[in-house]
Amino acid sequence: MQKQGLLTEVIDALCCLPGVGPKSAQRMALHLFQRDRGGAENLAKALQLAVVKLGNCKKCRTLTEHELCSICASATRDQHVVCVVESPADVWVINQATDYQGVFFVLNGRLSPLDGIGPDEIGIDQLEQQLASQQITELILATNSTVEGEATAHFIAQMALANHIKVSRLAHGVPVGGELEFIDSSTLAHAFSGRREIE
């Protein structure tokens, strides 16, 4: 059976989502139009409004519909501790999984000279201004443990240390419940180098 018209457009549009191929997009579209037209309408309205209203927080660069996101605007957050992450998704994950009470700075990428992504493309100049002008006591580097993520962390660490700011890096190592024989050598090396004393 050949797909035609609007349904094809919806399926093609859904394929822009990460991890969604043509088959998954087809299942989603058919579900919305066969079983949940109200859900489809709500989804369309929410997406349309978000496209118009969502932008970046003036201070941390995460996604928000306000000038400042709820974290930066919160009086209960420690504005002197800043966690640097690669994407808004990382902000969500850290907030849900930890009791971190500081603020964030979202790079919206990572340094990758081969792809033409330098410091200007990921907001390093804005971060540098914050480091110089605000009373930041600690910078937590929570970039991914890829080659680019490590290079980005190193670049930012040097900048923070030049401003006499304490810099820490998220620990990398053996996952909870992991067995040593199944851990790759790079992860195990990180775990050994980042070991800590038991008190």
Image (tube, rainbow, N blue to C red):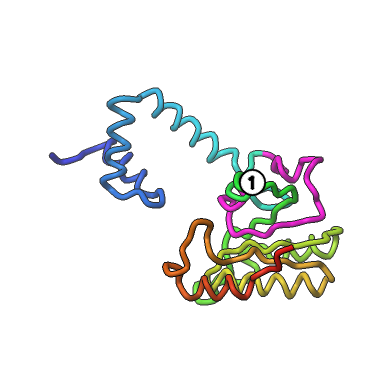
The one of 145 and 180 positioned closer to us in this rendering:
180
Q: Assign a secondary structure to mark 1.
A: helix
Name the quadrant of the C terminus. bottom right
Q: Position of residue 50 (x, y in %)?
A: 54, 38
- Within-10-Å neighbours for mark 1: few <14, some 14–19, many 20+: few
Name the quadrant of the N terminus. top left
Which region is colored magenta? 66-91
Examine the structure image and report whether residue 32 is included in the region drawn in magenta.
Answer: no
Q: Position of residue 10 (x, y in %)?
A: 33, 39
The one of 121 and 137 positioned closer to us in this rendering:
137
**Vertical arrangement, residue 68 with respect to residue 142, above or below:** above
Give the quarter of the image for residue 64: top right
Identified at 55% across, 76% down, the residue is: 189
Give the quarter of the image for residue 23: top left
Give the quarter of the image for residue 164: bottom right
Identified at 67% across, 60% down, the residue is: 84
The one of 5 and 38 positioned closer to us in this rendering:
38
The amino acid at mark 1 is Asn
List the single residue furthest toward the left. Answer: 1
Q: Position of residue 19 (x, y in %)?
A: 37, 51
Identified at 35% across, 48% down, the residue is: 20
**Vertical arrangement, residue 35 with respect to residue 128, above or below:** above
* 44 left or right, relative to 117: left
The one of 18 and 161 positioned closer to us in this rendering:
161
The mark total stands at 1
**Vertical arrangement, residue 142 with respect to residue 11, above or below:** below
List the single residue furthest toward the front. Answer: 199
Q: Which residue is mark 1?
A: 95
Q: Position of residue 192 (x, y in %)?
A: 59, 74
Examine the structure image and report whether residue 70 is included in the region drawn in magenta.
Answer: yes
Identified at 58% across, 53% down, the residue is: 90
